[in-house]
Image: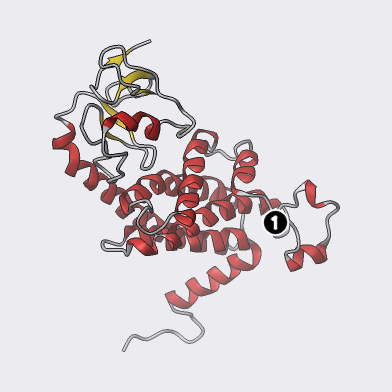
Amino acid sequence: MEHHDEGQPDEYEAAEEEALYLNRRHPLVANGLRLLEHAASALADEEPDRYEALYPVLHLHTAAEALLRGRLAMHWSGDIWPAHNGDQDSNRRTRGEYQGLGLHQAAGIAAGWCETDIEAARTDLMAWEYVRNRVLLSSDRDCDSLVAIRCRALPVLELMLAVVETDVLGELREDLTAQYARAVRRSLRRARAATARVREAVEESRRAIAPELAHWEVVVPCPYCGQFAVPAGRDMTECLLCGRDFGLCAYHAAGDLAPLAPAYEPEQCPDCGHHSILYTPTAARPDVEAAVCMVDGQVMWG
């Protein structure tokens, strides 16, 4: 039987004590880390139930908001008090009767405070907002696939890990007891390990479709998973990675793939005569937007 010296807590008890200590002093950080762990672990599950995808999506969205607010609140007591709530009121704060910062408000402010480049990841945060909307508003049949959710979740998970490691722990370096920092590091290790499994799942999905993608000269990005995985010029337009179907024929694909669909009106292709032009980057030139005909796969550079 393993022996513990009297008065010396074992490792589990010490970890629990540190976590409680962190929760009392920085509750937004502590709760955001818990949600980050839960989201990453659920998305890393080898055989998750697609119909349960709602929970890790909501957990990750709330985790990102809580961690960014938590970083901003590390110099205040409990949470930052947005100006639109009026004068600060400790009673309202205690009871939670105020309107806190949303994810994008918190990201906008934190971008000017944090060493992590949050501004560069604002597009990923907005894309995750769209994932949350689709999961909440779609039927089970129309919901994003697990692959699509993983692809969109991965940059958000990596951003939050960077924020915690660089900015949250950076603020805790002067903690004399080091209990805050130890609790954060324990949680960070678990979240990082789960995120690595999500990354490997995404990379495995990419490897699986690589041979088929190699047959197509022009490949455009999917607005759902965000990956270059939609070949142009196919009779049936679909994302080979996440499985999203963009219609039974390529004639309608340009409108479905456009950023502002269905308001977008595709232009007529001068070669095939169909209204099938999509202005988009391609896998070959991801930093340049071109006019791509989704019917015949022709690319017209401006």
Residue that label 1 marks: 79
Q: Position of residue 154 (x, y in %)?
A: 38, 47
The x, y position of residue 180, in whole percent, is 57, 61
Left or right: 264 as drawn, with respect to 239: right
Image: 204 above or below 52: above
* Point 44% across, 84% down: residue: 5
Residue type beneath disc 1: Asp
- Farthest front residue in view: 273
**In the image, 165: left or right of 87?**
left
Task: Tell whether 267 sits left or right of 24.
Answer: left
- The C terminus: image quadrant: top left
Q: Nearer the viewer, residue 206 or 192?
A: 206
Q: Which residue lies furthest to the bottom in this view?
A: 1
Q: Decide which of 102, 12 is in the foreground and name it.
A: 102
Residue 94, by quadrant, is bottom right
- Choose top left, top right, bottom left or bottom right for residue 246: top left
Q: Nearer the viewer, residue 274 or 27?
A: 274
Residue displayed at 79% across by 64% down: 92
- Give percent across and percent down for residue 88: 83, 55
Can residue 164 be seen by looking at this rendering? yes
Name which residue lies at 36% across and 63% down: 51
Q: Viewed as shown, does residue 93 lie left or right of 40?
A: right
Q: Nearer the viewer, residue 219 or 201?
A: 219
x, y percent for residue 29: 58, 58
Is residue 182 visible in the rendered image? The answer is no
Mark 1: secondary structure: loop
> Which quadrant of the rendered structure holds the N terminus?
bottom left
